[in-house]
Image: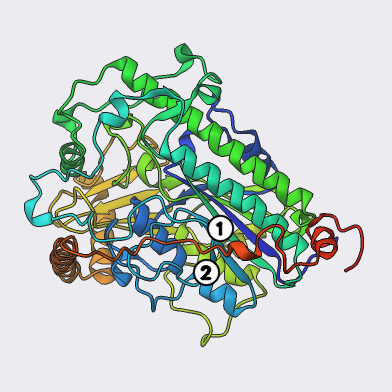
Amino acid sequence: MARSAQPNILILMADQMAPSALPIYGHDLVRAPNMARLAAQGVVFDSAYCNSPLCAPSRFSFLSGRLPSRIGAYDNACEFPADQPTIAHVLRQRGYRAILAGKMHFVGPDQLHGFEERLTTDIYPADFGWTPDWTRFAERPSWYHSMDSVISAGPCIRTNQLDYDEEVSFVTRRKLFEIARGRDERPFFLVMSLTHPHDPFAIPCRYWDLYDDAAIAPPRVRIAKADQDPHALRLRHVCGLDLDDVTDAQVRAARHAYYGAISFVDEQIGTVLEALDDSGMADDTIILLIGDHGEMLGERDLWYKMNFFEGGARIPMIVHAPGRFAPHRVAASVSLLDLLPTLADLAGGAMSDDMMPAHDGTSLLPHLLGEAGSDEVIGEYLGEAAIAPIVMIRRDRWKFIHCPADPDQLFDLVADPDELANLASDPAHAATVAAFRREVGDRWDLPRIEAEVLASQSRRRLVAAATAKGTTKAWDYQPFRDAAQDYVRGHMDLEDLEASARFPRVRGE
């Protein structure tokens, strides 16, 4: 089949899916055959990262190609500015049909951000109710992570996340067939975003029973509380890690359920890939598999994300287009920021300056072609458990983490992939640390960013408190569906309808 200049683009996104738990990155127990097939036929990025290890900031950076501090995307209750161009805007400008199914954690009255169709509501609230407060750090927010997800981990019959993700995969499949049967000739840009394997760690027996409980290995890296860095201690506080005694059996159950959730995600992906193939569109569709951030899963005695350790910040990234790019693996470090310029390239070539929004990433097209490309990730964390901006630079063998409130961290990820030896105070690495600190000073005005974060938090807390009183008007997305146009209705010609709804068509055009 001839390759079109503007291929369809399908993004498959999973929430909190750590590469370390995937067979395509070396896990020998977890079962994910559909992801494995994408990897075997695609370009696998072995060192891909989010730019902020928290759901909303990561997703807003992914869509905009901008760092969180540049767009005010500090935490999970920040409004994503409606005037910020996104990948969806860019591709619509290039003639694409932009469609979103599933979670994107948009906050604010704009719930589309360039997508012309949104097939589901979001699973999380769109208001300011989850705004953190750096000035009252000692007070744990009642709405945030707790260890209940670990303590109560195990098999279940049903959860709201299962309801949500099964709806998302269903409407994605249905939309693919609708596109195949329709007369809209535009290529599609379709994002399917699932909320699994995000905690809570509960999954039906169908997926739980894929794994022998005795085969679930415990966390490999254990770090006593007394040896944790200051930010890790703040994470322990904000997530209540020290409020309950957690047994080895509960830790094992949480990891067991997480692996089962990955298999659930893989199954949903498989049904969508099958629909793509059955619709006849697979050969002209570029597929990307990505995550929004990682999951510590008990490593370093930490859970969830909100940090720049490998478990929290690394993500899976696969580009599947075997007719365009030969399967191979990329060792260089890349990030979600790089996807906006990459997709612009894949959607018909580089855009002119007046059409391309400002962005902080670099196109991955050279990597996809097997050539030398960028090797750099820039990150920011400005959410819960921070009390000042935390920034990260990942380049070559190094990861440098800086926060005005904490000691610096420097890790050599080649010699020390588990990040056990902080080299920042080692005289042998003083020059490297000094160079990174100069770069931090050049890249960021950290006092200004801190002041902007605090001012934003104050404004949003006031608005959230005020709008909770009296009559409220929710921003949560309400999918529109015109039942008068569904299935069979009196104003429709029955024979034409049934002929056009059947795929493949049996008569007519």
Contact flag, marks 2 and 1 (Cβ < 8 Å):
yes
Horizontally, is 41 left or right of 423 in the view? right
User: In the rendered view, does 376 fall on the left or right side of 182?
Assistant: left
- For label 1, the residue is 191
* Image position of 57 (left or right of 30): left
User: Could you tell me which residue is drawn at 72 percent across and 72 percent down?
Assistant: 184
Which of these two is toward me, 332 or 130?
A: 130
Tag shown at residue 115 = 2
Instruction: Give 239 or 410, whichever is nearer the viewer.
Output: 239
Tell me residue 496's x, y (percent): 83, 65
Q: Is residue 117 above or below residue 313?
A: below
- Identified by mark 1, the residue type is Val
Residue 370 visible at all? no
Q: CA distance from mark 2 to mark 1?
A: 10 Å
In the image, which disc is placed on residue 220? none
Q: Under tag 2, what secondary structure? A: loop
Q: Which residue does the image show at 31% across and 27% down from the upper left? A: 150
